[in-house]
Image (cartoon, coloured by chain):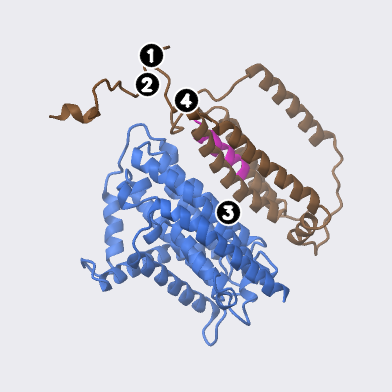
């Protein structure tokens, strides 16, 4: 293969960035940070795809993941008990199961990388990846891709409808009440207003 | 080879970034003075004085910010502006990066800008900055969608996702005439994405400066510089996508490109000075109910023309 040494260096740096930022996703204590570390990891993978001459897929990865992670962070903050996403919280659950699943998947993928026979036939010089990808997406495979897209969209809308029925602090139709700081205590951050109308302004004069 | 493939592109991008951002300050000051804003010193010196003043100021701190993200966000926004400028063709041969998917890369710059602007407001850990950040996220999605449809419209006659091909396809007729809705929509997106003038909702006065409300000193200088640079990148992209880029009689290509870029920039800055700020709620309605359908019409128009 004839490509400059800088491609190798760029690949190594990007691969390290992808792995390290992917690992940081599980070490951080904030949903917003976790989303953006994941975004960083995906960006590194996207640039690696550009290095592999998948120019459309690599660049598409950048904008898809940017919007996706932004929307994901916003939705997580909306639906979870951490309004700004800056408060520390435990981000990992089910340790034993996830460690086992991670090890199994790593072994499987590493096995594929080491044992599989990758094709060595070089690409034709006049191949235009963007055009061939477009022909594939909107040609023979159009039905598959379009139905998958519509199924995903309906799933997303359905999930939002189902989960937004329940507000952050209980049923949405009952009105939002934050839980107490001690079990069974008064709602946090909402001082009792036992005086009649006037509320907080009552004490001013 | 190293000079033409590495040093020249980097020089072109950095020079456009620095000179362009300075010119934004100069033109904006000149327009302001012409419209009767209080005149301090000459428009040529004012941006430099303000930059030097910010550089000597102390950088503010807030209670428990996310330091790395807070300091990184202005630099990342500047880097995105540089990425955008890197795909702008100045002549058939002078293109910093002639990626075959440069139009899509510009789309991802717009998408990543949403993340960076959000990060800038979020990481300060102050109320008004956070409101500005969420406000931009709510609006940013509609900016990206409008820009995407408009840019697909210019890619259709070129049959390519490459800016140099988009410019070359305008040899007979510029896209601003061929697709009359495209340029106005794209300019609105540009003002929105740099939150400038009527669409300055992320860093607006009603939020005491929004995402930048708690930023001072050198980070503030980088943030202001990045916004100006992003406006320049937008003008360059608009000039390539709609005004025929380097195409034009008598003068050399890069010079035409500079002239067109400055015209777009001046129009954007004039709008920024003349039109009052839109209310955020109305802006969301305007984007989704009026401008997004208009961008559909623009795309259908472009598609029909490409078919005929």
What whole-number distance in Å separates the C-alpha atoms at marks 1 and 3?
48 Å
Instruction: Specify which label sits upstream in the sequence, 4 or 2.
Output: 4
* Main SS, magenta residues: helix
What whole-number distance in Å separates the C-alpha atoms at marks 1 and 4?
15 Å
The residue shown at (49%, 69%) is: B184
In the orientation shown, which residue stands out farthest toward the left?
Answer: A205
Instruction: Specify which label sits upstream in the sequence, 1 or 4.
Output: 4
Residue with the mark numbered 4? A169
A47 or A74: nearer the eye? A74
Q: Are marks 3 and 4 on the same chain?
A: no
The numbered disc on residue A185 is 1
Asked if B201 appears above or below B100 in the picture, the reply is: above
Asked if B233 appears above or below A16 in the picture, the reply is: below
Image mark 1: chain: A
Residue with the mark numbered 3? B108
Instruction: Please tell me how crowded label 1 is: few (under 14), some (14-19), or many (20+) other residues with Cα within 10 Å.
Output: few
What whole-number distance in Å separates the C-alpha atoms at marks 2 and 1?
8 Å
A199 or B152: nearer the eye? A199
Residue with the mark numbered 2? A188
């Amino acid at each position: 293969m004839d490509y400059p040494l800088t491609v190798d260096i760029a690949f190594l740096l990007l691969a390290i960035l992808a792995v390290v930022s992917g690992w940081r996703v599980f070490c951080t204590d904030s949903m917003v940070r976790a989303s953006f570390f994941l975004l960083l990891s995906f960006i590194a993978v996207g640039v690696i795809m550009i290095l592999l001459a998948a120019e459309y897929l690599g660049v598409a990865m950048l904008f898809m993941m940017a919007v996706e992670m932004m929307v994901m962070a916003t939705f997580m903050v909306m639906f979870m008990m951490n309004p700004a996403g800056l408060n520390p919280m435990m981000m990992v659950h089910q340790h034993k199961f996830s460690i086992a699943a991670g090890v199994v998947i790593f072994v499987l993928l590493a096995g594929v990388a080491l044992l599989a026979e990758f094709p060595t036939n070089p690409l034709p010089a006049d191949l235009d990846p963007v055009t061939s990808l477009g022909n594939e997406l909107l040609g023979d495979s159009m039905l598959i891709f379009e139905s998958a897209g519509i199924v995903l969209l309906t799933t997303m809308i359905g999930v939002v409808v189902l989960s937004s029925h329940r507000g952050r602090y209980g049923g949405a139709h009952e009105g939002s009440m934050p839980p107490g700081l001690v079990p069974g205590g008064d709602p946090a951050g909402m001082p009792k207003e036992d005086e009649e109308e006037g509320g907080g302004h009552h004490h001013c004069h | 080879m190293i000079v033409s493939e590495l040093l020249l592109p980097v020089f072109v991008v950095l020079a456009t970034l620095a000179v362009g951002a300075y010119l934004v300050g100069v033109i904006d000051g000149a327009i302001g003075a012409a419209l009767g804003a209080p005149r301090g010193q000459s428009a040529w010196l004012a941006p430099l004085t303000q930059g030097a003043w910010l550089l000597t100021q102390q950088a503010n701190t807030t209670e428990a910010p996310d330091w790395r993200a807070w300091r990184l966000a202005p630099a990342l926004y500047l880097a995105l502006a540089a990425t955008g400028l890197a795909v702008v063709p100045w002549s058939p041969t002078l293109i910093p990066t002639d990626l075959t998917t440069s139009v899509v890369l510009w789309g991802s710059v717009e998408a990543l800008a949403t993340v960076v602007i959000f990060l800038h407001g979020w990481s300060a850990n102050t109320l008004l900055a956070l409101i500005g950040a969420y406000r931009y996220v709510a609006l940013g999605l509609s900016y990206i969608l409008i820009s995407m449809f408009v840019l697909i419209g210019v890619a259709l006659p070129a049959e390519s996702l490459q800016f140099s091909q988009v410019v070359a396809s305008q040899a007979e007729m510029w896209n601003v005439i061929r697709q009359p809705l495209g340029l106005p929509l794209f300019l609105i997106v540009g003002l929105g994405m740099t939150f400038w003038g009527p669409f300055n909702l992320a860093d607006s006065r009603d939020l005491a400066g929004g995402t930048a409300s708690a930023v001072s000193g050198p980070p503030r200088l980088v943030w202001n510089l990045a916004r100006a640079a992003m406006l320049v990148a937008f003008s360059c992209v608009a000039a390539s996508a709609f005004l025929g880029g380097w195409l034009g009689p008598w003068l050399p290509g890069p010079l035409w490109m500079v002239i067109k870029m400055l015209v777009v920039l001046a129009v954007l800055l004039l709008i920024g000075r003349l039109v009052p700020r839109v209310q955020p709620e109305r802006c969301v309605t305007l984007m989704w109910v009026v401008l997004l359908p208009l961008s559909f019409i623009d795309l259908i128009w472009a598609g029909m023309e490409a078919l005929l």
